[in-house]
Amino acid sequence: MEILDHFSLKNFNTFGIDATARRFVAIHNIEELKAVLQHNPQDQIFVLGGGSNMLLTGNVDALVVHIDIKGKKIVRENDDFAEVQCNAGENWHQFVLWTIDQGFGGLENMSLIPGNVGTTPVQNIGAYGTEIKDTFVSCDAMDTATFEITTFYHDQCKFGYRESIFKNEVKGQYIITSVTFRLTKRNHKINTSYGDILAELEKQHITNPTLRDVSNAVIAIRRSKLPDPAELGNSGSFFKNPVISKTQFEEVSKKFPHIKSFPVSETEVKVPAGWLIEQAGFKGKRFGDAGVHKNQALVLVNYGNATGAEILDLSRRIQQSVYDIYGIKIEAEVNVV
Ligand code: EPU
């Protein structure tokens, strides 16, 4: 375990922001993590997973601890299910592909989401009709004060839309070291209810899709709409889709009859922020090296040398403009650091 000084984080955040860590260490197992936590004050530590959901707005004046714990194993199985425990440092998409190779179902709709396994429960990642919470069993996490490993079971995690206990009540108190998923071995629940998936499968003339067909369809849709961070820095959806009351929605629809919505509850609807941002005129716009993606207005991009502050500034202009037009507040989904 080597601690490096003045380390560039450019390759460690998918936005490709060239910020520097005062010190940096990659840890490969629980013992190394414990040693690092024991020897450094808590307020001097900054935990970094896959760097796919954060915007660095300046240099990080701390010891950046990159969680690089690899490995996965089947911990329980019967004829119907396999429970797979995957360590935090595994790349999410590679893990999803591995589960499909094993014939295990449940994660296929979340193919190609950037980032590492350890951060997936934090914001209950989701795509195309499926969220982590649908297959999540538990996760192990190190308590940063006692250095003990605690297991958090599903009902303790308080999962919501891009929400969990790890973003709220226990924020900063635990470092997730592994996640366990319960996956189907037969009678897979193929979920093609999200419109885009059905359309993509139809395009390929597939009527009875396998896990791999669904995964391939998701990969094709994502490639067509979402920029590849290896080619164009980004952090996926920069904003969450706002949830507003039906009353407010009805008011806004009077003025904007084409506004879209998805049901959430008896009293609330979700409005696609991508639509709001597009209508506000930002889709495909570029301001210096910061921009709004041409195919998906929810995604902010770094054309090369944008600073985190420039991207943050653009995000604030978008928020203000959407608020001025529709009276709807859109919140950032990424962590602004
Ligand atoms: N839309 C527009 N203009 C745009 C983008 C979207 O009008 O530029 C409209 C679309 O026409 C559609 C609706 O918004 O009617 C929804 O669009 P889409 O299916 O692309 O999904 P989204 O709500 O924009 C969410 C997630 C994505 C996830 C997709 C698919 C959030 C914040 N984002 O986006 O997640 O891939 O659904 O499930 O919930 C991510 O979190 O990083 C991410 C990419």
Image: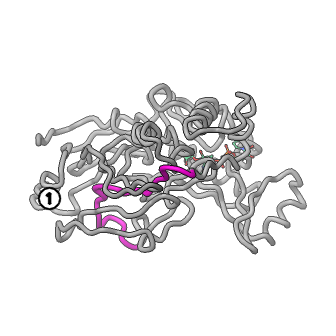
Q: Work out whether residue 7 can be spotted.
A: yes
| In magenta stretch: residue 62 | no
User: Is 9 displayed left or right of 221 in the figure?
Assistant: left
In this rendered view, identify the residue nearer to me: 101 or 159.
101
What residue is shown at x 74% (from left), y 70% (from top)? 245
Q: Work out whether residue 114 can be spotted.
A: no
Q: Ligand 1 within 8 A of label 1's CB?
A: no
Give the secondary structure at mark 1.
helix
User: Is 146 displayed left or right of 214 in the figure?
Assistant: left
What residue is shown at x 51% (from left), y 30% (from top)? 228
The vertical placement of 304 against 63, above or below, is above
Q: Magenta part of the protein: which range?
A: 169-187
In this rendered view, identify the residue nearer to me: 91 or 56.
91
Say which residue label 1 marks.
Answer: 34
- Circle 1 crowding by C-alpha within 10 Å: few under 14, some 14–19, many from 20: some
| In magenta stretch: residue 174 | yes
Q: Give the image quarter of residue 34.
A: bottom left
User: Is 265 displayed left or right of 51 in the figure?
Assistant: right
Q: Amino acid at mark 1?
A: Lys
| Residue 264 drawn at (x, y percent) | 70, 66
| Residue 267 drawn at (x, y percent) | 75, 74
In this rendered view, identify the residue nearer to me: 193 or 254.
193
Q: Which quadrant holds the N terminus?
A: top left
